[in-house]
Amino acid sequence: MLVNHRDTLPVRIGFCITDLDPGGAERQLVELVTRLDRGKFDPVVYCLGPRPASNPRSLADELEAAGVPVHCFDARRSWQFFSVLRRLRRQFAADALEIVQTFLFHANLLGTLAARRAGVPHVVTGIRVAERRAGWHLTLARWTDRWVERHVCVSESVRDFCRQAGLSESKLVVIHNGVDVARFAAAQRRSLAEFGIPAERQVLTHVGRLDAQKGVGWMLEQMPKIFAARPTAELLLVGDGPELADLKRLTARLGLAGRVHFTGFRPDIAEILAASDLCLLASRWEGMPNSLLEAMAAGKPVVATRVEGVEEALGPATAGQTASPADPQTFTQKAVAILADSELASRLGRDNQARARQFFAFETMVEAYQQLYASLLTPNS
């Protein structure tokens, strides 16, 4: 009797991403790939960009330590598009992939084209943000839609955005981002003295890339009012990005240099959140903010702008912790109210953590992806 190889061998599945520098999407990929059931799936990772330097935060090293092969294609300039496409196609074919899953715009484009040319049977893209800067991203996504079997959207809001942008509604599925709830819940608070914050201060923390999307400049402009109402409060900005110099200049211009602290990239986010009193998110647009999920997992109250994914993440606690990006007064008032009421802060933190544990654990995310992949391999699914 003939035996289908899928009944005896794990499915070879390729994960293609733009780069492997530490970031929200990159961390989600690593957690997904390393947590897959290896009895069912045999993963390989393809990174369009250069291989990150080996250091304690290298995601490529982390993947390989987990037994996952990593291929990096050293793409740095747009003129390399066709050479990288050819190399990626050859590697997909050589690895005899049955599924290609892509993450982020450039990988969605190149990965889809390479998979089609390599004859990969199933292509799944990952749409992780309601991108509002580059309209041509959507044009190319619509063009390649014909070769994609499913688009994974990280929130219902992103699915709505994609449907309105013209992607095939029948191909859009939602799988929320995940978070390591146990690790964030158990993290020990670390001293923030190295950042110049005394132990007795109330600490507001923003974690994220210092980029226009994240609205950090808008948030800084609200801080004088928050600080006036809460004289012991200080702001910690965790992350790096292209707006760093501009934000430091804005901080000085607002007279906040002694109360706003820039940390750069940090590997100890869980411990920093454990030492924080309130987490802030001021994004102009999002998908499903990883920093919000981490704050929730850490059991912290938040004040966030109501952008894509935020209401889905916070659920019933949304009203007490959000404001419109066009309403800085409400953003400020809610931050002050939470800082002034320790009982309210504790209750919101507990509710946030319980919701993170119930709906956004990595185990839930991984199982949803595995069910999706299995459905693609099942005839007539």
Image (spheres, rainbow, N blue to C red):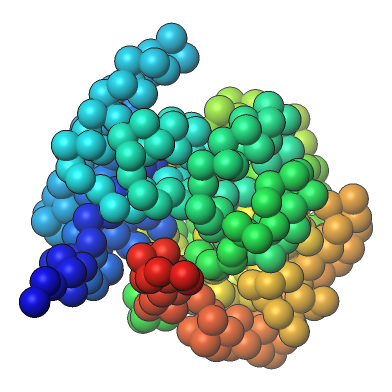
Judged from this view, the residue extending furthest toward the top is 79
The picture places residue 341, in percent across and down from the top left corner, at 74, 83
User: Residue, x 15% and y 46% (percent of image)?
Assistant: 69
Vertical order, 290 against 48 (above or below): below
Residue 304 position within the rendered picture, expressed as x and y whole percent measured from the top left: 72, 62
Work out whether 246 lies above or below 171.
above
Query: Looking at the image, which is closer to me, 10 or 265?
Result: 10
Q: Nearer the viewer, residue 156 or 39?
A: 39
Q: Position of residue 363 (x, y in %)?
A: 38, 78
The quarter of the image holding the N terminus is: bottom left
Left or right: residue 139 compared with residue 325: left
Residue 23: x, y in percent? 43, 46
Q: Residue 230 falls in which quadrant of the image?
A: bottom right
Q: Which residue is rendered at x = 68% and y = 47% of the image?
A: 167
The total of numbered circles placed on residues is 0
Identified at 90% across, 50% down, the residue is 326
Residue 41 seen in the figure: yes
- Residue located 40% across and 36% down the image: 116
Between 234 and 165, which is closer to the camera in this rendering?
165
Position of 187 with respect to 249 (left or right) is left
Which quarter of the figure has residue 367? Answer: bottom left
Q: Residue furthest front?
A: 1
**Is 9 or 285 nearer to us in this picture?**
9
Name the side, left or right, on which 189 lies relative to 60.
right
One can see residue 59 in this view = no
